[in-house]
């Protein structure tokens, strides 16, 4: 499974747009890019998934360049409740259901 | 009750005890997973079950024994654990493959 690299932490203020970039240089042709959010002492929650170009849902947008070696999660107008750890995962082209979580990015939203 | 539930939510056990963690999903999913999350560490995948068959064992010590009697239930049997096994144990389910995984609230395990 492809390794991902993302910033350990980020700070933002309420109302700002936050962009978290993830590098995945060894992504396989049939791998998907998935982002999860985790609050302390809770299980992760799915945010968004994409394969290429741009995906948008009611929570976030995911931008994937043509070479797919990186991706950017965009959170519009964050609030204090968006303070959490955000994980970028790459897989599961083999349909194994195997997810490998990295360290994630701890986002701290300040008032 | 909907979603993925886990019991107990908290568990304290001695190294000689035997206990079991239970996970139940009400989503009609075919795949279930056990993860371990130690303090300030990423989640570690432990086991994957697809259609009740174990398809992944991520080099987990034998003191952790999973059981999947049907697609809705998943157990993790624990025996002779070590203090370093103290962690948050998370269960998840999905339709399989790359589909979104739904996580339960976890069991906070402390081994004395």
Image (cartoon, coloured by chain):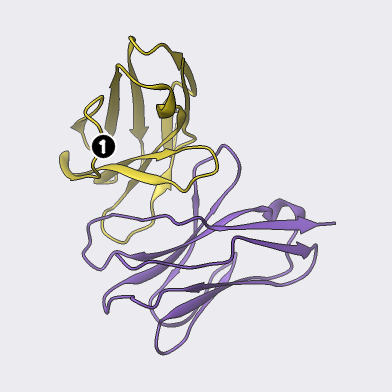
Chain colours: A purple, B yellow
Residue A50 placement: quadrant? bottom left
Tell me the quarter of the picture where residue B68 sits: top left
Task: Describe residue A71's horizontal placement relative to residue A18 as left or right.
Answer: left
Q: Is residue B26 above or below residue B98?
A: above
Q: Residue at x 76, y 64 (%)?
A: A12
* Helix, strand or loop under label 1: loop
Chain to which the residue tagged by mark 1 belongs: B
Q: Residue at x 31, y 72 (%)?
A: A31
Tell me the quarter of the image containing the N terminus of chain A.
bottom left
The x and y percentages for residue A36 are 50, 57
Q: In the rendered view, tell whether residue A25 sits above or below residue B78.
A: below
Horizontal and vertical percent for residue B109?
46, 24
Q: Residue furthest right?
A: A111
Report the side of A49 relative to A30 (left or right). right
Q: Report which quarter residue B34 is drawn in.
A: top left
From the viewer's perspective, is residue A81 above or below residue A3?
Answer: above
Q: Residue tagged by mark 1?
A: B60
Image coordinates for residue A47, horizontal then vertical, percent = 51, 60
Residue A44 at what x, y percent from top left? 50, 48
**Towards the viewer: A37 or B95:** A37
Question: Furthest-bottom residue in view?
Answer: A66
The residue positioned 21% from the left and 28% from the top of the image is B62
């Amino acid at each position: 499974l492809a390794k991902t690299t993302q910033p350990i932490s980020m700070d933002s203020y309420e109302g700002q747009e936050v962009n978290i970039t993830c590098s995945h240089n060894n992504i396989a042709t049939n791998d998907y890019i998935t982002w999860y959010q985790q609050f302390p002492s809770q299980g992760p929650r799915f945010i968004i998934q994409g394969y290429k170009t741009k995906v948008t849902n009611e929570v976030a947008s995911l931008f994937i360049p043509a070479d797919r070696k990186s991706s950017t999660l965009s959170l519009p107008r964050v609030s204090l409740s968006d303070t959490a750890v955000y994980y970028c995962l790459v897989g599961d082209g083999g349909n194994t259901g195997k997810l490998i979580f990295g360290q994630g990015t701890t986002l701290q939203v300040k008032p | 009750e909907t979603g993925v539930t886990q019991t107990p939510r908290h568990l304290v056990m001695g190294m000689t005890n035997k206990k079991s963690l239970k996970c139940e999903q009400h989503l009609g999913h075919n795949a279930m997973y056990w993860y371990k999350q130690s303090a300030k560490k990423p989640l570690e995948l432990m086991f994957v079950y697809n259609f009740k068959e174990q398809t992944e064992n991520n080099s987990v010590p034998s003191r952790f024994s999973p059981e999947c009697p049907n697609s809705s239930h998943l157990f993790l049997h624990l025996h002779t654990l070590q203090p370093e096994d103290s962690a948050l144990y998370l269960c998840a389910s999905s339709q399989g493959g790359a589909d979104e995984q739904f996580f339960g609230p976890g069991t906070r395990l402390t081994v004395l």
